[in-house]
Amino acid sequence: MAATTAAPAKGKRRAAGPLFVAPFLVLFLLLFLAPLGYAAYLSLFQQRLIGGNVFVGLDNYAKALQDPLLLHGVGRVALFFVIQVPLMLVLALLFALALDSGLLRLSRVIRLGIFVPYAVPSVVAALMWGYLYGPDFGPFAQLGRELDLPAPQFLSEGWMLGSLANIVTWEFVGYNMIILYAALRTVPAELYEAAAMDGAGAWRIAWSVKLPALRPALMLTLLFSVIGSFQLFNEPSLLMKIAPDVITSSYTANLYSYSLAFTGQQLNYAATVSFLLGLVIVIASYGVLLTANRRRTS
Amino acid sequence: MTTTTATPQASVNAPVNSRAARGFGRRRPKPSHRRSTPLTIAMLAALAYFLLPLFWLLIASTKSTQDLFNSFGLWFSHTPQLLTNIKETFTQDGGVFAQWLLNTAVYAVSSALGAALLAAAAGYGFAKFRFRGDRIAFNLVLGAVMVPATALAIPTYLLFAQAGIVNTPWAVILPSLVNPFGLYLMRVYAEDAVPDSILEAARIDGAGEARIFFTIALRLLAPGLVTVLLFTLVATWNNYFLPLIMLNNPNLYPITVGLSSWAAQAQNGGAGSSSDMLALVVTGSLISIVPLVVAFLLLQRYWQSGLAAGGVKQ
């Protein structure tokens, strides 16, 4: 998203304008900026046994940047992002192109069926997949026992990140597919006809006409994916209950900040971690936007 | 690359129009569309992956905890008992499950209505009026799209604790009312969907700004409004982190937090436990997804065209 959507010149100055935006902006101030500011404020203090709440400057940040638990958590979600997001977006793109090609039978059923997981709460998705993965009554384990084959240990340390990636992919491929598909439907038909007249085949049209037209929609899905993966919480926190040895309380950065605040009662440090995590996400988002925009201009 | 940059400047209503136009244009040379069987089969295979867990859930909801362990997961046991499970889900712990459903509905509907209305008014205000600081304010909100909700959640909790509203419904509803992406979507939508000429005409007729908004603009904004409404509804319905932090009274839990607390109990009960918790978690999961799936299917016309607006424009 370009940050400066050009304002239409037509709009006239009228007193009513601010009144329409005021309710939103007031709540935005109270519920967005105030917590951010409060987190920033809290992150500058430490609760000490002697002396109570003490101003410590950037000490909490210095501590956080050297905290192996936090760094591992961020590293893990970064790895998750690098593996899961491309996989999910490529699948969503392929599905959207297939739906848009007009070559499918039952395309409506397929479209809605792939989208349905989006309407499933991530808690339910994680519970469901957790049971499916499970060694007791998961169908994969059952089949393995039946056929005397070793079933994959989905909940083991080596598989866990992949298992989580599968859950998130299952949840969001359809959502991204719908955004891309909706964008594809707005490409004027004349463009395809012109390309076909120039002798372009279906793949050529997909690559040279459809993909460029999908740019803004792809950016949007990518942006949401950055934000989503770095704050990964629900799925690991649910699977933690069935695999407590694999998923520790600092498995992802967000899980860590949660357990700091509510199990460890280290509110100041939790605020620091939240604030840093937010910063990492904003930087990653801008990074993604900038690289994408640079590629376009070059 | 020598691509002619295809910037779709289509208006928001274009998905419908261009679809019709394209279908018509293609139909002329051949009486029917070419269909590809291999592609259809490949997509059906993909569809199977997406529906498999839901199929499992449906089957599993008909089983007792015992049968979950003793029968194959992807087919019915000899003694299906869906109705018994549903009944037990609703009577467990003094009928708290119904309370969770109700809470979820209240949180989700009030958040969605509030968020959609706030976003519509603000989006309309930014799209159709110029005033001092409008760009700065809009870009500030747009920048906030990138601030992750969960990074805000803990600071918001601390702030709400100071204000004394943790462990009340407000703690869950208030943060869901501000939807920066919804504002962005409504602004983009309002620019095209509400023609300036109509506004001018109404003003000449002497209508006040509030009246113009509520009687004319809001109606034109309906598809965008439904999109924001539906997606906020889903976000709140599915929200776990925020209510988990804010609430510790089980009677205030939404369905997600409630189910996960039952799941934890079922887990602690272990495999040999005589309690039927596991079957209840599974059945409760099934019940909890029905309303949203139905809402999406019924309202698909709206959210699909509404999403197109957000994805197409920059």
Image: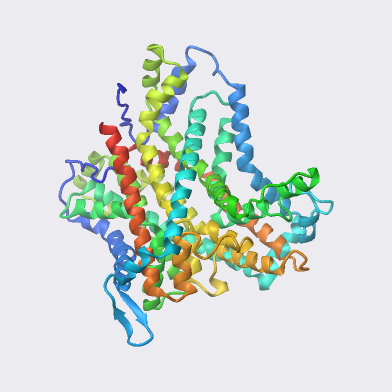
Q: Examine the rendered structure and indicate whether residue B100 appears above or below residue A288.
A: below
Can I make out residue B240 in this image? yes
Q: Residue at x 44, y 39 (%)?
A: A179
Q: Quadrant of residue B21?
A: top left
Name the quadrant of the C terminus of chain B.
top left
Q: Is residue B74 above or below residue B7?
A: below
- Between A232 and B54, the residue placed more toward the observer is A232
Q: Tell me where residue B236 appears, x and y as whole percent.
A: 48, 58
Question: From where the camera sits, is residue B186 visible?
Answer: no
Which quarter of the picture shows residue B81?
bottom right
Q: Measuring from the top left, give residue A261's x and y in whole percent.
A: 44, 72
Is residue A246 or residue B259 the one in the foreground? A246
* Residue at the extreme right: B78
Left or right, residue B163 beside residue B75: left
Which colouring convention does the figure follow?
A: rainbow
Question: Number of labelled discs?
Answer: 0
Left or right of A246 in this view: B57: right
In screen coordinates, is A262 left or right of A50?
right
Of all residues, the one furthest to the bottom in this rendering is A50
- The residue that appears at 39% across and 31% down in the rendered structure is A186
Rendering coords of residue A141 (x, y %): 73, 49
Kindly identify the residue that appears in the image at 51 percent across and 36 percent down: A91
Image point (23%, 55%), residue name: B137
- Quadrant (top left/top right/bottom left/bottom right) for the N terminus of chain B: top left
Image coordinates of residue A2 in percent, x first then y, are: 27, 43
